[in-house]
Image (cartoon, grey):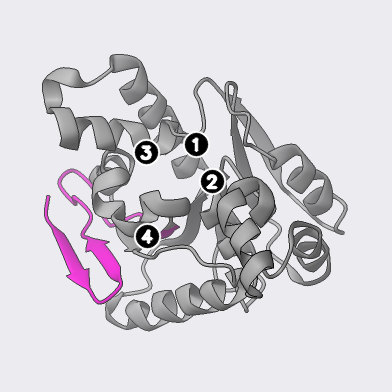
C-alpha cells in the first residue's frame, strides 16, 4: 500500500481486493501538528480504511491563527483533487481535533459531501491551546486569538453549516474533547441527524497507533490500540450508509 504526495495532499488508493467497487473517497484533516505528516501520524487508521475500499486524500498543514483561511484552503485543495476521481461511492469528510473545526468551517457548509465524522472535536481558544504564542501576540501586537474564535465558530456552525449527517466520536479519557457542546449546536438545527458515539481511548487514539508503528516498529503495537482503530473504521463505514 503506497502513499503518493500531490502538493499538500497525501493520497492513498483503495485496496480493491475482494471489493466489487471502491467505497468512495475520504477527505481527511488531522489535528494540530500531527497533521504535518498525516501519512505517518495517522497511518494505521487511514490504511485500515483504504483496505476497506476507501480512497484517502489527507491534507498536510501546519496550524495557524486564521482557521477560516485554512478551512478555505483545505476545501479548495480537496475539491481540485477530485478531478481524477470517478465520483463512485460516497464522499465523506473525516477530521481529528482541530481538523473537525476546519471541516465545519468549509465554505460549502458541508453541502458537498455525504457526511462528516468528527473525532475528538476541539475548539479551545488560542490562550488555552498555545499560551506562549498568545502572550507574545499581546506583547508584539500580532493576532493572538483564532479566527473565528471558539464562540464565533459555534455561532457560524449554527448559522451556516447545512450537513445533517454527522458522527461525533468522543473518547472516554479525553480531557480536550468538546463534542457534547458541538452536538447541542448541531442538534438544534431543523432536520439534523447528528449522533454521538463514546469509545474507550484518549485524544491521541486516532493517531497513536500509526506513530507507534513508525517510531518503534510492529513489535511495539498495542492490540488495544488496533482494536480501537478497527472500531473507528467500523463506525466510519456505517456512516457511509
Toward which corner of the image does residue 26 lie, by quadrant?
bottom left
Compare marks 3 and 2 and give the one earlier in the sequence.
3
Q: Nearer the viewer, residue 217 or 107?
A: 217
Badge 4: residue crowd in 10 Å (few <14, some 14–19, many ≥20): many
Q: Residue at x 64, y 37 (%)?
A: 177
- State left or right for residue 220 relative to residue 122: left
Asked if labels 2 and 3 touch by Cβ distance under 8 angstroms, the answer is: no
Compare marks 2 and 4 and give the one earlier in the sequence.
4
Q: Which mark is residue 235?
A: 1
Residue pointed to by mark 3: 207
At numbered mark 2, what does the secondary structure look like: helix, strand or loop? Answer: helix
Residue pointed to by mark 4: 24
x then y, percent, for residue 72: 54, 78
**Is residue 158 part of the magenta span, yes or no?**
no
Asked if labels 2 and 1 touch by Cβ distance under 8 angstroms, the answer is: yes
Which is closer to the viewer, label 3 or label 2? 3
Q: Residue at x 19, y 68 (%)?
A: 5
Q: Is residue 15 above or below residue 70?
A: above
C-alpha separation, residue under disc 2 versus residue under disc 4:
12 Å
Toward which corner of the image does residue 139 lie, by quadrant?
bottom right
C-alpha separation, residue under disc 3 versus residue under disc 1:
16 Å
Residue pointed to by mark 2: 239
Amino acid at each position: 500500500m503506497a502513499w503518493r504526495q500531490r502538493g499538500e495532499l497525501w493520497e492513498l488508493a483503495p485496496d480493491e481486493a475482494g471489493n466489487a467497487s471502491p467505497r468512495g473517497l475520504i477527505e481527511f484533516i488531522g489535528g494540530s501538528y500531527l497533521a504535518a505528516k498525516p501519512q505517518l501520524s495517522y497511518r494505521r487508521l487511514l490504511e485500515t480504511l483504504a483496505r476497506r475500499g476507501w480512497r484517502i486524500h489527507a491534507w498536510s498543514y501546519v496550524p495557524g491563527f486564521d482557521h477560516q483561511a485554512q478551512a478555505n484552503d483545505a476545501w479548495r485543495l480537496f475539491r481540485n483533487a477530485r478531478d481524477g476521481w470517478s465520483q463512485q461511492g460516497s464522499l465523506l469528510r473525516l477530521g481529528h481535533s482541530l481538523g473537525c473545526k476546519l471541516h465545519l468551517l468549509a465554505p460549502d457548509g458541508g453541502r458537498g459531501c455525504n457526511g462528516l465524522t468528527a473525532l475528538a472535536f476541539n475548539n479551545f481558544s488560542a490562550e488555552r491551546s498555545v499560551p506562549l504564542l498568545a502572550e507574545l501576540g499581546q506583547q508584539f501586537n500580532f493576532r493572538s486569538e483564532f479566527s473565528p474564535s471558539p464562540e464565533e465558530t459555534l455561532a457560524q456552525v449554527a448559522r451556516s453549516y447545512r450537513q445533517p449527517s454527522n458522527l461525533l466520536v468522543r473518547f472516554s479519557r479525553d480531557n480536550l474533547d468538546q463534542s457534547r457542546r458541538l452536538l447541542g449546536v448541531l442538534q438544534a438545527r431543523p432536520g439534523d441527524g447528528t449522533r454521538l458515539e463514546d469509545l474507550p481511548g484518549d485524544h491521541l487514539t486516532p493517531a497513536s497507533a500509526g506513530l507507534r508503528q513508525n517510531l518503534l516498529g510492529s513489535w511495539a503495537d498495542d492490540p488495544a490500540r488496533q482494536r480501537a482503530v478497527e472500531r473507528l473504521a467500523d463506525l466510519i463505514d456505517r456512516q457511509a450508509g
